[in-house]
Amino acid sequence: MQQVTSVTPPRVGNVSFIASVVDATPMSQNKVSKPITAPYFSAFECILNGKEAIYCSSELTSGRRAYDEMRSRGLKSMSELKEKLGDAWYKENIFGKNIKLANTFADSVRANQTDLTPVITPAPLFVPGWGQPEYLAFWEELIRTRVKEVRFNENWQFSNGCTCEFVAASEARIPTFDSKTNPLAPEAALTRVEAAVEQLGRENLDIPQELQDNLQRLRSLVGPEPIQGEVVRNPLNPSLTATPRPATLRGK
């Protein structure tokens, strides 16, 4: 018989959740680090049933679409875009359109699975009171504990969330692939994110602190930059060597 311990219902914002802490060892070997997310991981267990899934990472609240709108309207930041056009416009034209593309991407990955591997897209999840930090923490933990590979949609390198998810997958040594199923190694990912940040700088757009932080995490993950003639091993896979980055990007 499972051991059930009553706990005070956790709260997210103004929303409380009625839940119990259950010794679920017979059902799952996966652990949950925060009780407040336990009901959501429990729901995933109902679907995964001990299997590992493919996670599809796509831009949602930030990314290339939002930056294109800023540039075309002479704006510099996400906050300016929302202030000028309103939350309703933002939800329809940025978040809403990104959701459709994220779901389409996940559908295409799902259609190509011959072994019925579950495919997860973050787009449909909505929790009242959660902001991006809560969502990112939840998906990062899910990637680390319940995912066997991560696929990245086009333009992922401009997204705060996608770059965070790439770092999480790489730290957990989970295979990563681009939208065309090509392997996406940390060195190649680093080059893409650095190029994206450099492009935003050239376009005179504000670079979110989250994206800068994820870039630094990725640089630390890849390791020291090779100098001319030096071979540096990838710490995640010693059989691979690091790819030198363009000199114009070094130290930025």
Image (cartoon, rainbow, N blue to C red):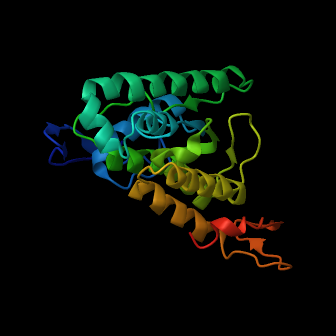
Measuring 45% from the left and 23% from the top, which residue is drawn there? 97
Task: Please name whichever residue, 174 or 116, is drawn nearer the observer in this view of the structure.
Answer: 174
**Residue 227 in which image quadrant:** bottom right
Measuring 50% from the left and 29% from the top, which residue is drawn there? 47
Does residue 81 appear in this view?
yes
Question: So how many labels did they put on this image?
Answer: 0
Q: Is residue 18 above or below residue 184?
A: above
Q: Residue pushed farthest front? A: 74
Which image quarter holds the N terminus?
A: top left
Q: Is residue 240 above or below residue 65?
A: below
- Residue 164 horizontal/vertical position (percent): 50, 52
- Residue 153 horizontal/vertical position (percent): 61, 35
Q: Residue pushed farthest right? A: 229
Task: Please name whichever residue, 110 or 200, is drawn nearer the observer in this view of the structure.
Answer: 200
- Residue 66 horizontal/vertical position (percent): 44, 36
Measuring 34% from the left and 45% from the top, which residue is drawn there? 132
**Residue 239 in which image quadrant:** bottom right
- Residue 64 horizontal/vertical position (percent): 52, 38
Measuring 46% from the left and 46% from the top, which residue is drawn there? 161
Q: Is residue 237 above or below residue 25?
A: below
**Residue 106 in which image quadrant:** top right
Which image quarter holds the C terminus?
A: bottom right
